[in-house]
Structures are given as structure tokens and as C-alpha cells.
Image (cartoon, rainbow, N blue to C red):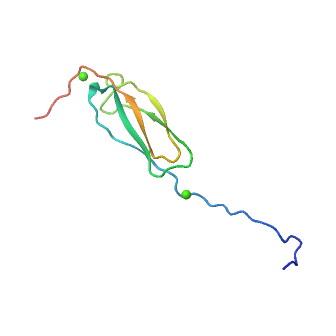
Amino acid sequence: SGNTSNTNDSGTVTITDNDTPAMSVGDVTVAEDAGTASVAVSIDNPSSVDTVVSITTTDNSATNPDDYTTTTVTATIPAGQTTVDVSIPITDDTTGEPTED
Ligand SMILES: [Ca+2]
Ligand SMILES: [Ca+2]
Ligand SMILES: [Ca+2]
């Protein structure tokens, strides 16, 4: 009503985002002699900025160095997109797996 000295002050409203993407790494089965395994890395919500992911391979039933070479691969999911394929090098050994009857 004009009875204060500062009739034009302003305040700031900060809206915090609640859509932080969660990352998931897909499972894949490939032949031993395929050379590489293509693994899909996805986020559940697209981000407004590029999402950089670092994938490091570790032993499970496959072991380094007979089945693959331990490696770290960096890949980028571009802003606005939700998935990128990461290529993991694998090794073709000469050892057979036991089969079950
Ligand atoms: Ca949001
Ligand atoms: Ca193998
Ligand atoms: Ca083989």
C-alpha cells in the first residue's frame, strides 16, 4: 500500500528436482568367440545433462585373463536419452565347460 520504504522487494523460490535417474546394467549372453559383449547401460529417467558411466569388469564364473581381460570402460548417455551400449572385450579360450545330462 506504499507505507514501506521498499515497495519492490523480491524473493527466490527454489524447486528441488525429484527425478534423479537410477542406473541399471543389463544382463547379456554371448558366444565365447564373439570378441565383445555389448551391454546396455540405462537410466530410468532422461537427464538434462550428459550422464557419464564407468564400467569395470570383475570376476564371477568368468575369470581374468582366461575368459576376458579386466577393463574399465567409460561411456556417455547423452542428455535426453536413457541408454547406451557398452562394448566389453571377451576372450575365446580352449577350455570346455562340463555339461549336465
Ligand atoms: Ca524434475
Ligand atoms: Ca571361457
Ligand atoms: Ca573357446
Foreground of the two, 42 or 59 = 42
Residue 28 image point, x, y percent: 31, 38
Residue 50 image point, x, y percent: 54, 42
Residue at the spot 28% in from the left edge and 24% down from the top edge: 33
Foreground of the two, 80 or 96 = 80
Is residue 18 shown left or right of residue 12? left
Residue 10 image point, x, y percent: 77, 66
Q: Is residue 87 above or below residue 23?
A: above
Which image quarter has ligand 1? bottom right
Residue at the spot 36% in from the left edge and 34% down from the top edge: 38
Residue at the spot 45% in from the left edge and 35% down from the top edge: 55
Rendered image quadrant of residue 42: top left
Residue at the spot 52% in from the left edge and 56% down from the top edge: 19
Quadrant of the image for the N terminus?
bottom right
Quadrant of the image for the C terminus?
top left
Residue that lies at the very extreme toward the top in this rendered image: 94
